[in-house]
Image (spheres, rainbow, N blue to C red):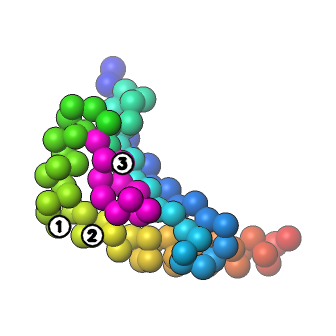
Amino acid sequence: GFRHYVVNNCEFNSSKLNDIEYTLSYYYNKLEIIRFSSSVGKFVGYTEHGIKNAEKWNNGQEVITRRGFKERYCFHNVGVFTESALTKS
């Protein structure tokens, strides 16, 4: 069978916005086909299909939406996770 999945990821060293990296990766059959990284600020394709989608998404609303995820998704959740971990340790 074929498998497609998407991974949202927030990596951080502290709860400061500058220390947070947001990535969104699309996989097909265990092969990463396209990725958005907040440090790069755009989509990058790794396969022929991924490159075509990256070009399209980088010229549309999708890239603008993803650029805000670092602050809206990661920054909020890092604070929640950090506070939760500190209160239990």
Disc number for residue 65: 2
Q: Residue at x 75, y 70 (%)?
A: 85
Label 1 packing within 10 angstroms: few (<14), some (14-19), many (20+) = few
Q: Does the magenta-highlighted stretch encompass residue 23?
A: no
SS at mark 1?
Answer: helix
For residue 51, what is the image quadrant? Answer: top left
Left/right of residue 59 with respect to residue 7 in the rendered view: left
Kindly identify which numbered label has been placed on residue 61: 1
Label count reads 3
Q: Which quarter of the picture shows residue 27?
A: top left
Image point 50% across, 70% down: which residue?
74
Query: Marks 3 and 2, Cα distance to the nearest angstrom?
Result: 14 Å
SS for dot 3: strand
Report the residue that reaches farthest toward the top: 1
Q: Is residue 36 left or right of residue 70?
A: left
Q: Amino acid at mark 2?
A: Thr
3D distance between C-alphas at marks 3 and 1: 16 Å
Q: Is residue 61 visible?
A: yes
Which residue in the structure is indicated by mark 3? 35
Q: Earlier in the sequence, mark 3 or mark 2?
A: 3
Q: Are marks 3 and 1 in contact (CB under 8 Å)?
A: no
